Amino acid sequence: MHQYLFFIGDFPIRAYGLILSLSIILATGVAYFLAKQDGRYHGHIIDMGIYCGIAGLLGARLWDVFFFDWNYYQNHLSEILNVWQGGMAIQGGIFLGAAIGIIYTYHHKIDTWALADIVAPAIILGQAIGRCANLMNGDAFGAPTGSAFGILYPESTLAFLTYGNQPLWPAEVWEGQLDFVIFALLLIFRATNHAKGQAFALYIMLYSAARFFLEYLRGDYNGLIFGLFKSAQMTSLISFSIALIFFIWLGLHKKTSDTPRSTEKGRKKRTVHHQ
């Protein structure tokens, strides 16, 4: 792995920033494809990708600073935006990105739940690619495996500074792989006759469950809340519970997702053809 891909003069081009930018671009592109296929809202996707992408980066950084590493950053305020040092909490990215998305849909009179269902697979795809950035940067790393199995990080990474030359669990790699599995599951679920909002709720549930169990392998922070769970596990439990309640409630008060315009057009064409 290489933290620095190359230099332009003295300015480093970091793998972390490049892959993270690529994750936002590709996630936006996939969201555009899904919206265009659905026949709704694709004209808003690029703008939302920019606004929600920036908000997601800011939210992920601030969440990590204030909830995970405040003991350090309260004495190093000038380093709060130094994302290349490691420290991006995806929960904060989802929270602030979703908040900006809700504001955008409200302002443009867009059905928030319908759009959330459409873009849910794209969001988890962006997260999966983003974990590749964590791997290249040597952050979001696992705890020591206690065996010969594991990832050995270079000396310049936070993982090496924390654990030295010990093999660590590939926590970020496995999370990225699980995110790709969730991406596929969401695409399959969206093809079913689900209630509006259930696809997005399922995304929250699946990711929260995966993150909860993967936290047992993480080694970048070990503080426990109430002596039971790590902060990310508590967030995952709360998020999963709320999403599960909404998933069930939406199913009981089922309002099927609006029929895509493209499907309606196809039906009209087929009707005319048979006449």
Image (tube, rainbow, N blue to C red):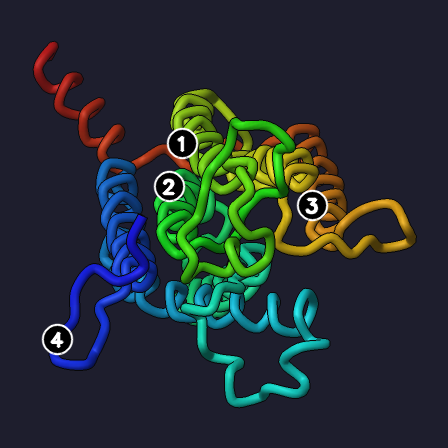
Q: Which residue is the extreme one toward the right?
A: 226
How far apart marks 4 and 2 lie (CA) works out to 30 Å
Disc 3 versus disc 4: distance between alpha carbons? Answer: 41 Å
* Mark linked to residue 8: 4
Please identify the residue farthest to the top as the structure is shown. Answer: 274
Q: Nearer the viewer, residue 126 or 157?
A: 157
* Disc ID at residue 138: none
> Where in the figure is residue 118, as x and y percent of width and height?
39, 41
The numbered mark, 3 or 1, whose residue comes first in the sequence reads 1
| SS assignment at label 4 | strand
Q: Would residue 47 be found to the left or right of residue 172 on screen?
A: left
Task: Please name the residue shown 53% across and 64% down the image.
Answer: 87
Sequence-wise first label, 1 or 4? 4
Camera-nearest label, 3 or 4 = 4
Query: Does 16 sit above or below residue 230?
Result: below
Please say if the residues under marks 1 and 2 sit with CB atoms less than 8 Å apart: yes
Question: Disc 3, disc 4: CB below 8 Å?
Answer: no
Disc with the residue nearer the chain's start (3 vs 4): 4
